[in-house]
């Protein structure tokens, strides 16, 4: 009987040892060639990446001036300095960015702060960890020649929206702020063709990103009046953020810290020397028009840090303001807290980028 118990113990030990070996082997390799990072990222004693690690960033849209700090960090080697071999992907839509992150097919994404909040409200387990701009980018763009001076002046006129639910909330907020009735505005869905439709006179205004779309219309020789959301009844909140899933952040905090540190360096360079960052952006994206991109970067420049003490900060008060506005406008079923939304815990120490 004692002999049988001994054999049983030895067999149990052997099974456990085999299971351990197989687990370690599985963790040490991956068939996933999507650019995502394995869970066993090796770190130094100080919590930094200890070896070169492949990672993927999905932009919010086609490369443009708001991404200048990303391309500056690539050109200057900041990601590689932090042991990240970064691949940048251009999405087909904002939904594509969110889908890739939630499916674990990419490490980081960029999205409008409101889109991230909306996804959190829908129960998706994502978190923002870096603010790229400190103000909302959305608004209603009109031509100065049309003489629209307040939100009330949109009554009886045709305004184009992309079809995203937040567009209607932005338009309604701006109209109400001017004392107007949103129900008296003729709203048409035009996708992302606002610039063309406005310049051709088909619409009196459209919802878009004023530092991008509004600037393009101006460069085309048609002066605009931009009704910016946060200046016309809307909240101040981060208009573009970097985010990932909570699971990925918890599994690979060193990767998140490294990406944040390199990105901060790139945007701090851009704030100090926009001309160099513009050249880096244009060098990697030959299809961009220099005149439009330069003017857009001039518009984005003051927004990168804004009134924050440093680049990248996510202000809890701004998150609370966004939460209240989204609930009031039917874009969120219930309020969300700054703790759920995300924060500054992965930013490098001040002066330690």
Image (cartoon, grey):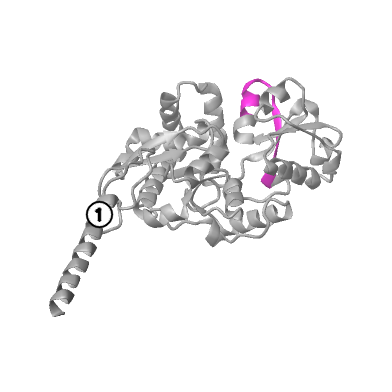
Q: Nearer the viewer, residue 353 or 59?
A: 59
* Quarter of the image where one finds residue 222: top right
**Residue 259 picture location, percent across and down:** 38, 46
Question: Which residue is at 29% across, 42% downward?
Answer: 81
Q: Quadrant of residue 253?
A: bottom left
Establish if 102 lies above or below 62. below
> Is 5 placed left or right of 226 in the picture?
left
Q: Is residue 273 visible?
A: no
Quarter of the image with the N terminus in it: bottom left
Taking depth in this image into account, of 292 and 96 the one nearest to the observer is 96
Residue 319 pos. (x, y %): 59, 56
- Name the outermost residue toward the bottom: 2
Whether residue 149 sits left or right of residue 353 in the image: it is right
Provide residue 350's location: percent of width, then percent of height.
Answer: 39, 54
Q: Position of residue 326 (x, y in %)?
A: 68, 52
Rendered view: 30 above or below 342: above
Of residues 108 and 317, the one drawn nearer to the viewer in this rendering: 108
Residue drawn at point x = 70 percent, y = 56 percent: 327
Mark 1 — residue? 22
The furthest residue to the left: 3
Up the image or down, 194 lies above or below 133; here it is above
Q: Name the foreground residue: 266 vs 202.
A: 202
Q: Residue at x 67, y 26 (%)?
A: 195
* Label 1: few (<14), some (14–19) or many (≥20) C-alpha neighbours in 10 Å: few
Describe the element under mark 1 as helix, strand or loop.
Answer: helix
Q: Which residues are magenta?
A: 215-230
């Amino acid at each position: 009987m004692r002999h049988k118990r001994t054999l049983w113990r030895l067999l149990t030990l052997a099974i456990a040892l085999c299971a351990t070996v197989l687990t370690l082997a599985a963790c040490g390799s991956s068939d996933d060639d999507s650019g995502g990072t394995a869970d066993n990222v090796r770190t130094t004693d100080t919590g930094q990446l200890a070896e070169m690690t492949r990672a993927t960033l999905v932009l919010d849209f086609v490369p443009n001036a708001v991404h200048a700090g990303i391309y500056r960090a690539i050109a200057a080697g900041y990601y590689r300095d932090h042991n990240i071999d970064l691949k940048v992907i251009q999405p087909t839509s904002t939904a594509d960015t969110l889908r890739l992150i939630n499916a674990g097919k990419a490490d980081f994404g960029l999205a409008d702060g409101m889109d991230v909040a909306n996804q959190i409200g829908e129960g998706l387990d994502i978190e923002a960890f870096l603010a790229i701009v400190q103000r909302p980018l959305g608004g209603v763009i009109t031509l100065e020649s049309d003489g629209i001076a307040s939100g009330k002046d949109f009554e009886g006129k045709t305004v184009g929206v992309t079809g995203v639910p937040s567009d209607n909330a932005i338009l309604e907020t701006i109209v109400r702020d001017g004392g107007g009735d949103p129900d008296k505005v003729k709203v048409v869905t035009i996708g992302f063709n606002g610039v063309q439709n406005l310049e051709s006179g088909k619409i009196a205004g459209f919802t878009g990103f004023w530092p991008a779309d509004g600037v393009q219309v101006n460069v085309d020789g048609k002066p605009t009046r931009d009704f910016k959301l946060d200046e016309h009844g809307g909240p101040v909140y981060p208009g573009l953020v970097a985010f990932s899933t909570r699971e990925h952040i918890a599994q690979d905090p060193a990767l998140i810290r490294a990406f944040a540190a390199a990105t901060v360096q790139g945007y701090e360079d851009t704030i100090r020397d926009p001309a160099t960052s513009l050249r880096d952006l244009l060098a990697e994206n030959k299809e961009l028009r220099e005149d439009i991109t330069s003017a857009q970067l001039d518009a984005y420049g003051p927004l990168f840090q804004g009134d924050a003490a440093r680049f990248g900060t996510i202000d809890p008060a701004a998150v609370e303001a966004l939460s209240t506005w989204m609930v009031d406008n039917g874009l969120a079923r219930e309020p969300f807290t700054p703790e759920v939304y995300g924060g500054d815990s992965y930013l490098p120490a001040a002066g330690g980028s």
